[in-house]
Amino acid sequence: STPSDIFPAAAGLLSLSRRALRAPRPSSLPARRGCRGGSPADSRKDLLEIPLPPWQERPGEPLQAKRARLLYESRKRGMLENCLLLSLFAKENLNSMTERQLNLYDRLINEPSNDWDIYYWATEAKPTPEVFENDVMVMLREFTKNKNKEQRLRQPDLEYLFEPSQ
């Protein structure tokens, strides 16, 4: 016996979900962006595409609120490598960034749908697209080189947020 003999309702749902995945998208949905990268030989048959809302700049956001949001978003990435890299980078740099740099950083960490892209650009494993090639990316690449050979094994504690600024 097959699973569809034992669970006929599940077989119906499975065929429904397959049809939904093959159905054309309504034009009102944002462009599809995959949740993993591919290679030239990749058939992409196993790619699960999740429509993500496009990144939008927040022009009226107060600077302190923007810094707090970017700090949070730097810590909660979904992949450990970027959680470590971006949270430590944010701790070291967010408070000294200009509004323009904060906007560039916001776009960098929120526009690409694949966190591996950000990691590969920061580590120079792949070339950075021109749209993200700016002074913030230069800062991130320099930070990633870890010239002082610091141990970066965990995210920074949050107590530093409550310490008086020097």
Image: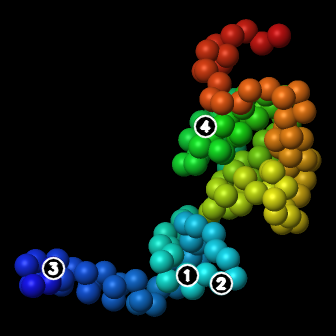
| Residue occupying the point 51% across, 75% down | 47
Q: Amino acid at mark 3?
A: Pro
Q: Nearer the viewer, residue 49 or 101?
A: 49
- Which type of secondary structure does the marked residue at label 1 adopt? loop
- Mark nearest the camera among 2 and 4 is 2
Q: Is residue 119 visible?
A: yes
Q: Earlier in the sequence, mark 4 or mark 1?
A: 1
Q: Earlier in the sequence, mark 3 or mark 4?
A: 3
Residues at circles 1 and 2 in contact by the CB criterion of under 8 Å: no
Disc 3 target residue: 3
- Which type of secondary structure does the marked residue at label 2 adopt? loop
Locate the N terminus and report the quarter of the image it occupies. Answer: bottom left
In the rendered image of this protein, does residue 64 appear above or below residue 27?
Answer: above
Residues at circles 2 and 3 in contact by the CB criterion of under 8 Å: no
Mark pair 3, 4: CA separation: 42 Å
Neighbour class for label 4 at 10 Å: few (<14), some, many (≥20)? Answer: many
Relative horizontal placement of residue 4, taking residue 84 as reference (left or right)? left
- Which type of secondary structure does the marked residue at label 4 adopt? helix
| Residue occupying the point 85% across, 55% down | 124
Q: Amino acid at mark 2?
A: Ala
Mark pair 2, 4: CA separation: 33 Å
In the rendered image of this protein, does residue 133 appear above or below residue 20?
Answer: above
